[in-house]
Image (cartoon, coloured by chain):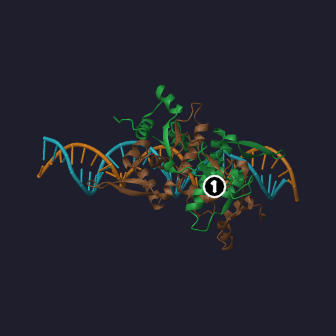
Chain colours: A brown, B green, C orange, D cyan
Amino acid sequence: MRWEDTCNQTCSVARATSIFGDRWTLLVLRLLFLKVTKFSDIQQTLGITKHRLTDRLNRLLEEEIVYKHLYDETYKRYEYRLTEKGIDLYAVMIVIGQWGDKWLTDGDGAPVEYVHKNCGQNANPALTCSCCGEKLTASSLSLRMGSGLQKKLENEEINKFDEKLYANVFGWEKK
Amino acid sequence: MRWEDTCNQTCSVARATSIFGDRWTLLVLRLLFLKVTKFSDIQQTLGITKHRLTDRLNRLLEEEIVYKHLYDETYKRYEYRLTEKGIDLYAVMIVIGQWGDKWLTDGDGAPVEYVHKNCGQNANPALTCSCCGEKLTASSLSLRMGSGLQKKLENEEINKFDEKLYANVFGWEKK
DNA sequence: CTTGTTAAGTTCCATTTTGGAACCTATATT
DNA sequence: AATATAGGTTCCAAAATGGAACTTAACAAG
């Protein structure tokens, strides 16, 4: 499988990764959340080359993760803003940042802290179970087949890589 | 700035992204969480070439996100297992998967669901404030400087890209 | 009206990364 | 002695990336 075929996988992590799991894209998205939205500002803040940035922004436009918004009528200049789909990636940014804060700061502590506006405290965002509210850890979750996979199985839309993966996850016999 | 210099940024998202924000690495990590841990199984499940996989696994070994575990004494075969640092990335996987479930499944629903072992229900993992327990959204958080950034400022360890970024985030004047 | 400036690209070309296929090595099986 | 298998490594072509120069549309200054 070539990299560009990962978007055809059934797994949601793979499909999402096929969009932003490459060089620069996550860093661009991070800047959009931080309100660095103009082409030249993004380019200078990252030090990325212009054509690379053009490429990444076009991909995000295609995927409707960002849209162009006219911010200067006279010069016809556009900034890149997150759509609802894009804003929904905030959890991804937060969680990646939390992991970096914990494991990559050499004991200096987080460079930036998140304050929860509603309660005024350091939010210290954590993943919890929507049902019982408990904090989730890797060992507290188990997997089961969802409707998306069932439908694909019925319609035989499962490719050989999917098959190999889910054979392992759900213990199907391998040929 | 070249891609390989992103690891020198102050921002935790940038530092984390410099490790797994490239082609294949997130997909490899996902398989390790799904207990696909042998070199050839990972290679065949992804369809990645062997030397590319070798490269990615070596990087994860260097970063101490995975370690090698002897699983076959006679053949001297090793599998790749997540360290504590690696297991801590489970939140990243879950959140990326959740986003994919919501935006990339064409209405078919999630291929895989998470069951919370403790309460037996569909976990539907959500980011919440550790202080008050409320669900967090992009608009409910604000940023403030943390000790990591303060120390770097005192020691003048801020590069020009950091400076440009934090000038924007915290409203410092630009030259 | 000519020159200059700025944001946002595009083009060209060299360098780096990735993909495909063949080859290598240690261990065990036939 | 030949074959199989996991886990690589090597070689080379193809694709992605980086650096620098060029382009375009809009206006501003002299």
The residue nearer to you, when weighing D9 against A135, is A135
Can residue B106 be seen at all in this image of the molecule? Answer: yes
> Disc 1 residue type?
Ile
Q: Nearer the viewer, residue A114 or A28?
A: A114
Quadrant in which the C terminus of chain B appears: top left
Residue on which the image places disc 1: B48
Image: B24 above or below A64 = above
Question: In the picture provided, is B149 more to the left or to the right than D28?
Answer: right
Residue at the spot 72% in from the left edge and 46% down from the top edge: B80
Could you tell me which chain the residue with mark 1 belongs to? B
Residue furthest bottom as drawn:
A155
- Give how far across and how far down residue B95 sits, in percent: 60, 52
Q: Nearer the viewer, residue A157 or B50?
A: A157
Q: Is residue B149 left or right of residue B87?
A: left
Left or right position of A148 against A45 = right
Relative image position of residue B78 (x, y in whole percent): 76, 45
SS for dot 1: loop
Q: x and y percent of residue A53 in the render?
A: 43, 51
